Image (tube, rainbow, N blue to C red):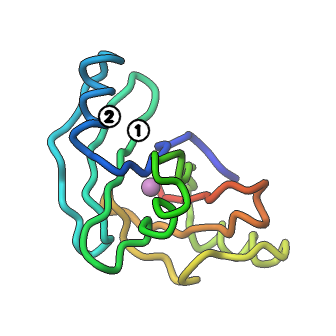
Amino acid sequence: MIGRLNHVAIAVPDLTAAARIYSDILGADVSQPVDMPEHGVTTIFVTLPNTKIELLAVLGDESPIANFLAKNPKGGMHHICYEVDDIIKARDHLLAEGARLAGSSEPRIGAHGKPVLFLHPADFIGTLIELEQA
Ligand code: CO
């Protein structure tokens, strides 16, 4: 059911410092910061030959990564995103298997303008999974 790895997201306490690590030290292609107020994050995209890394920093008071950063003050891997062909079909399959979603069971539009859902880490080996309809 799942297809390509779309991205790995890393929550960071300091976006400028994180961008410098990826651009200057790791030598990757790093975007300018993009504010996503509807998602409560500011994002920098790191483009790799086979996937993307998203560096996520808190934006505003209701950020979904604020708790994570409180528990992981140095930052850390926040979620991984797999592509699916049909997000409703994928959701219905997962629910039928007894898996739980994290947040809404209705897909919402994610950072790339495509429908996404999040799966509960307790059911997926401690990893928060984002599904994105490719
Ligand atoms: Co993501």
Compute the Cα span from label 2 to label 1: 5 Å
- SS at mark 2 in the image: strand
Q: Is residue 41 left or right of residue 100?
A: left
Name the residue rendered at 76%, 66% in the picture: 122
Crowdedness near tag 2: few (<14), some (14–19) or many (≥20) residues, C-alpha within 10 Å: many
Coordinates of residue 109 in the picture (x, y in percent) = 36, 71
Closer to the camera in the image, 116 or 30: 30
Coordinates of residue 73 in the picture (x, y in percent) = 46, 53
Coordinates of residue 118 in the picture (x, y in percent) = 57, 68
Closer to the camera in the image, 56 or 102: 56
Coordinates of residue 101 in the picture (x, y in percent) = 65, 75
What numbered label is drawn on residue 53? 1
Name the residue rendered at 29%, 79% in the picture: 61
What is the tally of numbered marks visible in this picture?
2
Q: Amino acid at mark 1?
A: Ile
Name the residue rendered at 68%, 69% in the picture: 120
Which residue is the site of mark 2? Answer: 46
Splitting the image into four quadrants, where does ligand 1 fall?
bottom left
Q: Amino acid at mark 2?
A: Val
> Under 8 Å from ligand 1: the CB of mark 2?
no
Q: Is residue 87 above or below residue 6?
A: below
Q: Is residue 68 above or below residue 40?
A: above
- SS at mark 1 in the image: strand
Quarter of the figure with residue 125: bottom right
Q: Specify the farthest residue to the right.
A: 97
Crowdedness near tag 1: few (<14), some (14–19) or many (≥20) residues, C-alpha within 10 Å: some
> Under 8 Å from ligand 1: the CB of mark 1?
no
Q: Are marks 2 and 1 in contact (CB under 8 Å)?
A: yes
Q: Is residue 10 left or right of residue 16?
A: right
Q: Is residue 2 left or right of residue 111?
A: right
Closer to the camera in the image, 69 or 32: 69
Quarter of the figure with residue 119: bottom right
